[in-house]
Amino acid sequence: MDSGLTLRARNDAMTDTGPLFASSGDLIADRRYRWALDLAARGELAGAADVLKQTVALAPTFAAAWAALGALRDQLGDRSGAIAAFETARDSDPEDFHGARLQLARLGAGDAAPRMTDAYVRRLFDQYAARYDTALAEQLAYRGPELLRRAVDAVMTAAGRAMRFGAVLDLGCGTGLCGAAFRRHADWLAGVDLSPAMIAQATVKGLYDRLVTGQLEAFLADEAASGGKYHLVLAADVFVYLNDLAPAMAAIAHVLAPAGIVAFTVERPAEHGVKLLPTLRYAHAETYVRETLGAAGLAVAHLADTPVRSEKGVPVDGLVVVAQPRPAHSRERGNPLPE
C-alpha cells in the first residue's frame, strides 16, 4: 500500500470515530462509547476513560471500547491498565480489527512482532483512503515510488536494457501512486490491494489494466497456479505491514519472469532482524532482507540506504531494493540483471 501513513500508536483509536465504530449490540453501551469518544476529542481524557469503564461494564466483550480504553489509559500513563484493556480487546476479537496485539507488543507485552491481521490492515487503509494522497504529500514527504523508479532505471541502464516492461504488478497498489510512476514504462499494469476503498481510489485514476481487491500472498498463489508471469513486481511501502517477508518473497519469486525483477522499500532499524516500531509499522534490517531474498532464490541488484518518508519532519531510515532471480551459477553480489 504505497504509504508512509502510520497509525498513531497512542490516540488514533480516539480520533477517527466513524471508521472505528462497531456496535456492541447494546444501545446504551453504544451511546456511552460515542460519548467517551466525544470527551476524548475535547481533551477530557480522564472523563472519557471513566465513561468507557461504564461502557465495558455494560458490554464486557465490546472490543472497540476496550481498545479505546487501552489507548486512553496509555495516554494517561497507566501502562498496566492499558495492557489489561488491550488484552481484553484482543481476546474479544480474534480478527484483531483494532490492532490490540500490536499495541501490546508496543507496550512490551505479548509477542514482540505479531502478524498484522488482514482485518486490521483493511480497516486502517479503508479509513484513510479518501485523504491518503494528500496526507502523504503534505505531511510525510513520501517519495517511495520515485525512488523505486530511479533504482529500477539504474539497474536496467547498467544491464544495457531499456526501461520498458511487458507485464508489471503493483503489490499493495493503494491509490495508485506507484502505478503513476511506472505506467509509462509498462505495456500492461496490474494492481492488488487488501483495501476496497483504496482500490476504488485507484480505479478513478484510470492507470491500471487490472485491479484486484485481495490479500497479497493469496493473489500471488493464484497467479502462480495460473502460470502468470511478470517482468516487474513493485511493492512501495508495503512490507512495513508484514512481520515475516519470507512467504511474500517466495511467492513473488514464483511469478517473476526469468529476467524479471522485484523492487521494494522497507524501513530499517538499527538492530538485526525485524522490529515493530512505535508507529506500529515493521522495520527490517539489511541483513534480514538479503537473507530472505537469498532463501527465495533472489539476488540483490541494487540496495540503497535512504529515507523514503518522514515522521513529524524527521527522515525515517529506509532501504530501496531491487532484486532478480538468482542464476544457476552464483554471480557477484550487486551485479546488474542478465541480458
Image (tube, rainbow, N blue to C red):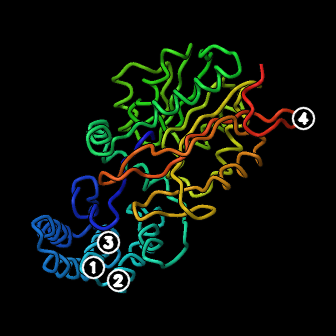
Left/right placement of residue 260 relative to residue 137 reads right
Q: Which residue is drawn at 41% across and 43% down?
A: 3
Marks 4 and 3 sit apart, C-alpha to C-alpha, by: 57 Å
Say whether disc 3 or disc 1 marks the residue closer to the N-terminus: 3
Mark drawn on residue 329: 4
Residue 123, can we see it? no
Q: Mark 3 points at which residue?
A: 62
Query: In what quadrant of the picture does the N terminus appear?
Result: top left
Q: Which residue is drawn at 14% across and 68% down?
A: 31
Say whether disc 2 or disc 1 marks the residue closer to the N-terminus: 1
Mark drawn on residue 73: 1
Tags 2 and 1 touching, CB below 8 Å = yes
Quadrant of the image occupied by residue 9: bottom left
Q: Hey, what amino acid is under mark 2?
A: Arg
Total marks in image? 4
User: Judging from the image, what secondary structure is the residue with disc 3 in?
Assistant: loop
Tags 4 and 1 touching, CB below 8 Å = no
